[in-house]
């Protein structure tokens, strides 16, 4: 079986796919360029041999995982490759689709490629929903800033003691009467955009609630357990689960920290005394880093379990609440030590976010064990 394997490399673009094949004995062959359409892909691959004798790969990119899912349904083994970890020759200055496809097939045969985790269709849909909500929040914030700056340019300031975007602030904006009719039109349009943004966020948050209710029990349990940690509410918990998937696929929390890109870069060659660390690599999931950084700011304050957190912890396993308390004590103390040593609060929060992810890993693995352990049967 091993002698009859054929390795297929695919350089995937929006409209085309360059295909190359490497035989088991190392012979290379260019298949050509096909349209990036399911029927064209199916027709091309069936000409190469039986699905169980083919091994294929392509780079992760903007085309997503639709090709992977199609090949899996056809019965072919496929690998989605991390682009930044593909070996590259220093003197290679020629890059074409054909050469890229042959290089992928060659490295697939030699085992030098690194695969990325591929979610299933349902999990990817949940991830897109969470990211759509984040995009809506950004648009809502921009619309609010646009309206505030418009009012500031024309000398309109809210009354004393009225905080921005409260009910009183909204009533004040809606009651404004500007001198010129054109300015009144602009005010109405800007206010309409703010209202539209708020309604869009509300719709997406309701959709997230419905998606969590329809999710498997194991995912719901992890989402509820993560909410037992300080600074982690429902939207954040769902976002973390959507970006990570199963926590137990990481054997150690350091692997998960590296996946997030929140670990410091390092250059420590040339001897034991040459030890240099730089800023975080950012070679990871930026959406996950954003969620962690937002939650990490809550660990500036004294450890405490107040009513909102206590309410979220009701019914959770004792192990989860214990991990949550350990996180509060350790992360708060570390933040204050770093700030006392002169670290800027922003850098200290990044370090706290990295360790917070380790505590989240502990919570996720603890909950997932309940759904992976074999159940005892009655004899």
Image (cartoon, rainbow, N blue to C red):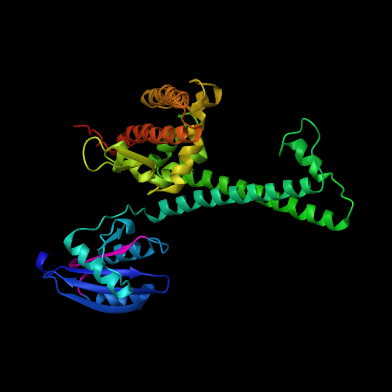
Front in this rendered view, residue 219 or 5: 5
Q: Say left or right for 314 vs 53.
A: right
Magenta region, residue range: 49-60
Query: Which percent across, then down, holds residue 35?
Result: 38, 77
Q: Say left or right for 5 vs 363.
A: left
Q: Say left or right for 206 vs 80.
A: right
Query: Which percent across, then down, holds residue 351?
Result: 41, 34
Q: Quadrant of residue 307?
A: top right
Q: Quadrant of residue 321?
A: top left
The answer to whether residue 6 of the structure is visible from this angle is: yes
Q: Quadrant of the C terminus?
A: top left
Q: Quadrant of the N terminus?
A: bottom left
Q: Is residue 310 above or below residue 266?
A: above
Q: Say left or right for 368 vs 229.
A: left
Query: Which percent across, then down, holds residue 178?
Result: 87, 50
**Residue 59 among magenta residues:** yes
Residue at 22 percent of width and 32 percent of height: 378
């Amino acid at each position: 079986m091993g002698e009859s394997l054929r390795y297929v490399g695919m350089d995937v673009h929006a409209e085309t796919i360059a295909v190359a094949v490497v035989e088991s004995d190392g012979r290379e062959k260019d298949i050509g360029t096909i349209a990036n359409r399911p029927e064209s892909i199916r027709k091309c691959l069936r000409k190469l041999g039986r699905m169980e004798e083919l091994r294929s790969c392509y780079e992760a990119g903007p085309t997503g995982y639709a090709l992977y899912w199609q090949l899996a349904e056809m019965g072919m083994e496929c690998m989605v490759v991390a682009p930044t970890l593909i070996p590259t020759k220093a003197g290679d200055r020629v890059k074409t689709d054909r050469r890229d496809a042959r290089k992928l097939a060659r490295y697939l045969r030699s085992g030098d490629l690194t695969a990325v985790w591929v979610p299933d269709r349902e999990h990817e849909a949940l991830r897109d929903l969470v990211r759509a909500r984040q995009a809506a929040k950004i648009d809502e914030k921009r619309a609010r800033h646009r309206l505030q700056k418009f009012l500031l340019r024309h000398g309109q300031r809210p009354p004393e003691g009225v905080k921005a975007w409260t009910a009183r602030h909204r009533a004040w904006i809606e009651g404004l009467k500007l001198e010129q009719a054109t300015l009144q039109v602009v005010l109405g349009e800007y206010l309409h955009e703010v209202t539209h943004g708020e309604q869009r966020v509300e719709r997406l948050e309701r959709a997230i609630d419905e998606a969590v209710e329809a999710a498997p029990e194991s995912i719901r349990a992890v989402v509820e357990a993560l909410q037992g940690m300080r600074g982690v509410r429902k939207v954040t918990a769902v976002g973390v689960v959507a970006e990570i998937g199963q926590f137990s696929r990481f054997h150690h929390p350091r692997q998960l920290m590296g996946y997030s890109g929140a670990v410091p870069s390092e250059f420590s060659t040339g001897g034991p005394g040459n030890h240099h660390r730089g800023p975080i690599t950012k070679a990871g999931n930026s959406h996950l880093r954003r969620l962690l950084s937002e939650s990490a700011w809550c660990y500036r304050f004294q450890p405490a379990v107040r009513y909102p957190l206590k309410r979220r912890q009701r019914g959770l396993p004792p192990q989860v609440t214990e991990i949550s308390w350990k996180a509060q004590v350790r992360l708060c103390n570390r933040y204050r030590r770093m700030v006392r040593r002169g670290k800027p609060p922003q850098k200290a929060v990044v370090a706290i976010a990295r360790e917070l992810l380790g505590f989240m890993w502990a919570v996720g693995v603890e909950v997932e064990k309940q759904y992976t352990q074999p159940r005892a049967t009655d004899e």
